[in-house]
Amino acid sequence: ELQATVKLALGMRVLVTRNIDTQEDITNGARGTVVDIVLNADEPFHNDTYSSITHLQHPPSFILVELDYKR
């Protein structure tokens, strides 16, 4: 079950908690760094220059993570 709110940031360290793709080493315990957050196309434009925090109305389309271990 996913949390209703997730704090996420570029450069944040993350940990894989399930085996996603064992042939590609995206496995439980793999560690990596968030390198991009691609917003949902329905997400309204945010232009708040005074805050580094954005509260999204929709989940991101996807989150790119660079894993520490690469084949």
Image: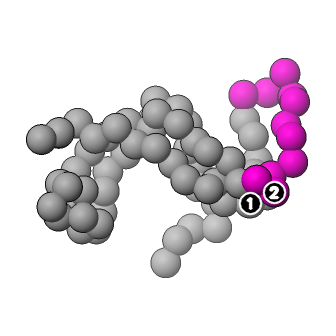
* For residue 34, above or below residue 62: above
Label 1 environment density (alpha carbons within 10 Å; few <14, some 14–19, many ≥20): few
Reading the image, the residue beneath label 1 is: 58
Q: Which mark is residue 42?
A: 2
Tell which circle, 1 or 2, labels the residue nearer the N-terminal end.
2
Q: Which of 30 and 22 is in front in this view?
A: 22
Q: Is any part of residue 40 visible from this angle?
A: yes
- Side of 51 relative to 9 (left or right): right
How far across and down, in percent of the image, does residue 37 sit? Answer: 58, 42
Q: What residue type is labelled 1?
A: His
Chain part drawn in magenta: 41-52
Vertical relation: 26 (above or below) 68: below
- Image quadrant containing the C terminus: top left
SS for tag 1? loop
Residue 30 inside the magenta-drawn segment: no
Please name the amino acid that badge 2 sits on.
Asp
Separation (CA) of disc 1 from disc 2: 7 Å
Query: Residue at coordinates 74% horizontally, 60% vertically from top-left?
Result: 58
Residue 14 vertical placement versus 1 (above, below)? above
- Single out the residue that lies furthest toward the left: 71
Q: What residue lies at 15% left-to-right and 61% top-to-bottom? A: 23
Dots 1 and 2: beta carbons under 8 Å? yes
Q: Total of numbered circles in the picture?
A: 2
